[in-house]
Image: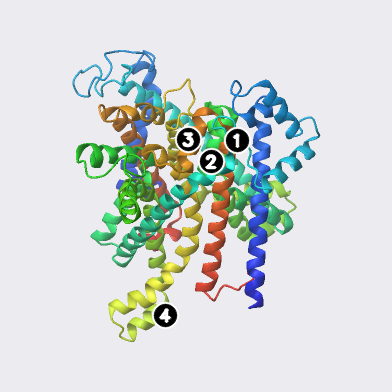
């Protein structure tokens, strides 16, 4: 028990250090930008008036030595102040919080879809290694792997929305819809299909490959041979001995990959006009609203750190062989 | 012929991949000859569908620019960014990995914590942020992709160095009085290169995808035609003109696929022991 508490505490400490490093990285990026850091903070020159710039310079202590500037910036962020978007006339933290649920819904759905489809494909390939199924799965996952996310999204709109008119192409709810409760949930789910499948494709390929490799590794191990020699039927052998052990490493790897889904969300949300933080980041890019971009980077990094922490702890619980403090 | 090379060249996957890559390279090199006019220039009427005018085989975009010429010039951008950012990332990753793995101890710890940090942050968001802040240009895109793609190289090289440094041939070199840098570069490094070479092909592929995505979002080099830009610029008219975004995307898919095929076969050819399990 003590060991688990210690492990959790250590993990939290590590996560906190990573977040602190990301905030510092943001600070370095602002300093790297050509020109006056105040104009970076305010958004590209021309957007902000002189008075606001002067106020920014004072607020961030731009006349102070660098380490004091860094301290001011970091302590501001740690108190939850992500700055103010001059363009949108709103605090950045409010902008992001407002958009976060849509992104979490999209990335969460894409992650689950990719994991289920990927593991199923990888298992089918790994258990039939060298046969036709294996070949088809490797070709399909190779193609998923090489497809630009934003392009396949556009092509999906072209096929499923424009030509076939099966699925909605844009947004999260039907325009003018005043549905509530289950009807609203169904409407959102309907809009979620294309973006979530698009975002999940690449990771489906990643998980399929990982699962296949993992199964090939496990199925030649001694305990599997023993189980087979004992006369265990194929079904239970696959379920209880091969899959259960092959899926363990997928948990951690999936956790690491999941964080990168957020990057793909920027592209997916831009293509499908999904109102999440990815779309927010795209608008901020177009308007050179750096304050918002830095905020999105920070929040997505925190999401990754939290997610990695959770998978790490889950892995420790699932696989008792891993020492709690290792 | 060298057996690894023969194994590589007789694999159909490698042949398909190499063919696509050679065609792409030829298109990039010959673009100024085949399409002497600036790819940004209007050459025909806007919204010309493909396969109708033999001079503009893939049609024109909403400003009357030749799509095929754009694809040829876009190949230059993709290949330059892919190769340059991968080369830079390889150098950085090899230096960090070799230094950490050879020295061990606290230097190793510190460098690997840093490497892990760069692997934790969402790479695409970070690359976008860097390009936006450094101002969009081919240089800033190369830098951004390099910064997000060196960590796997460093980890790979480090783990190879960590095992090789206590091997007998390294000990022998040390006893002979060879300097550390000489041992690193002439004894250990050549032994770690085959997995790095196989990895580099996949790195070029993902660099090309990242560059396309950056340009798609409108952060590409404003002076250079790029596949991602072509798709991004025409996505608002996709209902009327599918071909403007379809062809550039298909080309990205083929080139990335080719690099993946080459990477896989290189891996099989150079590391037969490692890949035996996966091949069946």
The answer to which of marks 1 and 3 sits earlier in the sequence is: 3
- The residues bearing labels 3 and 2 have C-alpha atoms spaced at a distance of 13 Å
Q: If the image is split into quadrants, where does the N terminus of chain B sit?
A: top left
- The residues bearing labels 2 and 1 have C-alpha atoms spaced at a distance of 11 Å
Depth check, mark 3 against mark 2: the one in front is 2
Report the side of B88 relative to B228 (left or right).
right
- Label 2 belongs to which residue? A95
Depth check, mark 4 against mark 3: the one in front is 3
| Label 1: chain letter | A
- Label 3 belongs to which residue? A282
| Residue that sits furthest to the bottom in the current view | A230
- Label 1 belongs to which residue? A291
Of B52 and A283, nearer the camera is: A283
The answer to whether marks 1 and 3 sit on the same chain is: yes
What residue appears at the point 79 percent right and 29 percent down from the top-left corner?
A63
Tell me, yes or no, if residue A232 can be seen here: yes
Crowd around label 2: few <14 · some 14–19 · many ≥20 (10 Å): many
Depth check, mark 2 against mark 4: the one in front is 2
| Label 2: chain letter | A
The answer to which of marks 3 and 2 sits earlier in the sequence is: 2
Tell me, yes or no, if residue B165 can be seen here: no
- Label 4 belongs to which residue? A223
- The residues bearing labels 2 and 4 have C-alpha atoms spaced at a distance of 54 Å
Q: Secondary structure at mark 2?
A: helix
Q: Secondary structure at mark 1?
A: helix
Report the side of B167 relative to A58 (left or right).
left
The answer to which of marks 2 and 4 sits earlier in the sequence is: 2
């Amino acid at each position: 028990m003590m060991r688990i508490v210690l492990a959790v505490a250590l993990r939290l400490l590590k996560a906190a250090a990573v977040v602190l490093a990301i905030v510092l990285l943001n600070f370095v990026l602002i300093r790297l930008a050509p020109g006056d850091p105040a104009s970076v903070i305010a958004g590209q020159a021309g957007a902000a008036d002189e008075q606001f710039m002067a106020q920014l310079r004072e607020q961030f202590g731009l006349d102070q030595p660098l380490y004091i500037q860094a301290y001011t910036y970091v302590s501001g962020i740690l108190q939850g102040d992500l700055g103010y978007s001059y363009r949108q006339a709103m605090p950045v933290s409010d902008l992001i919080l407002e958009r976060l649920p849509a992104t979490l819904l999209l990335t969460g759905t894409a992650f689950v879809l990719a994991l289920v489809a990927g593991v199923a494909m990888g298992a089918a390939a790994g258990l039939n290694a060298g046969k036709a199924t294996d070949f088809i799965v490797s070709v399909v996952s190779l193609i998923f792997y090489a497809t630009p996310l934003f392009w396949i999204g556009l092509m999906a709109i072209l096929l499923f929305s424009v030509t076939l008119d099966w699925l909605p192409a844009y947004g999260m709810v039907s325009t003018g819809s005043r549905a509530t409760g289950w009807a609203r949930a169904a409407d959102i789910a309907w809009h979620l299909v294309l973006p979530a499948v698009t975002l999940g494709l690449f990771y489906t390929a990643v998980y399929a490959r990982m699962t296949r490799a993992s199964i090939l590794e496990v199925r030649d191990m001694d305990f599997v041979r023993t189980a087979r020699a004992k006369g265990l039927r194929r079904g239970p052998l696959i379920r209880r001995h091969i899959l259960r052990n092959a899926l363990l490493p997928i948990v951690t790897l999936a956790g690491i990959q999941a964080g990168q889904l957020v990057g793909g969300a920027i592209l997916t949300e831009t293509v499908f006009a999904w109102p999440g933080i990815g779309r927010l980041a795209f608008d901020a890019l177009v308007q050179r609203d750096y304050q918002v971009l830095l905020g999105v980077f920070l929040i997505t990094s925190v999401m990754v750190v939290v997610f990695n922490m959770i998978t790490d702890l889950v892995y420790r619980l699932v696989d008792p062989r891993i020492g709690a403090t290792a | 012929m060298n057996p690894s090379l023969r194994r590589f060249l007789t694999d159909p996957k490698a042949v398909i991949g190499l063919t696509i890559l050679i065609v792409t390279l030829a298109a990039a090199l010959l673009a100024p000859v085949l399409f002497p006019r600036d790819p940004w220039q209007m050459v025909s009427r806007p919204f010309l569908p493909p396969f109708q005018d033999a001079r503009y085989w893939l049609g024109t975009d909403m400003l009357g620019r030749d799509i095929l010429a754009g694809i040829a010039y876009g190949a230059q951008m993709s290949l330059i960014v892919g190769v340059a950012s991968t080369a830079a990332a390889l150098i950085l990753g090899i230096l960090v990995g070799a230094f950490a793995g050879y020295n061990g101890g606290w230097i190793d710890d510190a460098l690997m914590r840093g490497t892990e940090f760069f692997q934790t942050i969402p790479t695409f968001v970070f690359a976008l942020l860097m390009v936006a802040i450094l101002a969009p240009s081919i240089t800033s895109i190369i830098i951004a992709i390099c910064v997000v793609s060196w960590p796997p190289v460093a980890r790979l090289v480090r783990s190879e160095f960590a095992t090789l440094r206590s091997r007998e041939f390294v000990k022998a070199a040390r006893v002979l009085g060879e300097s550390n840098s000489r041992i690193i570069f002439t004894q250990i490094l050549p032994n770690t290169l085959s997995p790095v070479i196989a990895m580099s092909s996949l790195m070029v592929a993902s660099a090309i995808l990242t560059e396309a995505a950056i340009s798609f979002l409108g952060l590409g080099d404003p002076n250079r035609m790029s596949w991602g830009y072509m798709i991004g610029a025409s996505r608002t008219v996709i209902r009327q003109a599918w071909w403007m975004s379809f062809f550039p995307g298909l080309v990205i898919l083929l080139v990335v696929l080719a690099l993946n095929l080459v990477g896989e076969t290189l891996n099989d050819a150079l590391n037969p022991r490692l890949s035996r399990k996966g091949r069946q």
